Amino acid sequence: GGDITDENAKGADGRVCPGPPGRIAYAAELRSLAALKAFRRNRLALIRELPQWPSRHVLVLPGFLSGDWATGPMRGVLSAVGHKVEGWQLGRNMGLRPGRFEELESRFFRFVGSAGEPVALIGWSLGGLYAVELARRHPQAVRRVIAMGSPVSGFLQANNAWKLYERVAGHPIADAPVDWEPGALPQVPMTAISARGDGIVHPEAARARPGPGVENLQVPGTHSGLGWNSHAIRIVADRLARG
């Protein structure tokens, strides 16, 4: 992709890069641990109130330095209400090292093949960028895409993780070893969920640009807690039930 990360750059819809969240929001990410305890207490009540039908095939992609263990709480709830949900099964998400997206694409093709129908993609943080790119490349195979706390605006430096990302992934964040378009919209229904208290990815950077079938929604909470955020899970379950 081209250089889309200049701090003064404007997004496709004229927005200016907001920069990363401040230190107070970053420190407040620790609240996600208390949120996980609350989620576990309220899990059964949450499951009871969610739509139980129809059943969808759902692939859930984790964030940077994360893995399927982090998406387990959400996947468990969605499975409990009848969806056929799987994790990405590719270990820890270390960024777009050479060949990584191709591995994900192969995993995606296997999942779609076993589903026998278009699937829903849910991606948390960096996983949301992967999900949007899969949907952009293969719209006929994707029912809808949901990104949570993902820099879907294309502002890849409006977060507190991009320098670490460059060290771990081994490439400049604006020059990944894959032909992709962060900030581009897929030709399928897309929901971008931002967390009001996000201390990792600026909430404004997690808003997709306007387009047909695109909706931007905000929930209270932190970036690190989005995978067990009851508000986010309600949105996800509702959108899956819609189609």
Image (cartoon, rainbow, N blue to C red):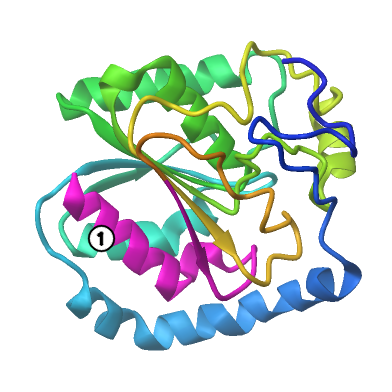
Asked if 81 appears above or below 106 in the picture, the reply is below
Q: Residue furthest left?
A: 53
Asked if 135 appears above or below 54 in the picture, the reply is above
Residue occupying the point 49% across, 29% down: 185
Asked if 83 appears above or below 171 in the picture, the reply is below
Q: Could you tell me residue 13's position as x and y percent?
A: 64, 35
Nearer-the-camera pick, 41 or 56: 56
Residue segment shown in magenta? 215-243
Q: Could you tell me residue 117's position as x and y percent?
A: 16, 26
Q: Circle 1: is it few (<14), some (14-19), or many (20+) Cα within 10 Å?
A: some
Q: Where, by quadrant of the figure, is residue 23 drawn?
A: bottom right
Nearer-the-camera pick, 77 or 220: 220
User: How many discs appear?
Assistant: 1
Q: Decide if residue 67 is on the left or right side of residue 24.
A: left
The stretch drawn in magenta includes residue 149: no
Q: Could you tell me residue 183's position as x and y percent?
A: 62, 31
Q: Decide if residue 42 is on the left or right side of residue 224.
A: left
Q: Decide if residue 81 is on the left or right side of residue 44.
A: left
- Say which residue label 1 marks: 238
Q: Could you tell me residue 19's position as x and y percent?
A: 85, 50
Quadrant position of the N terminus in the picture: top right
Residue occupying the point 37% across, 17% down: 138
Q: Where, by quadrant of the figure, is residue 222 drawn?
A: bottom right
Residue occupying the point 42% across, 72% down: 231
Which secondary structure, mark 1?
helix
Identify the amino acid type marked 1.
Asp
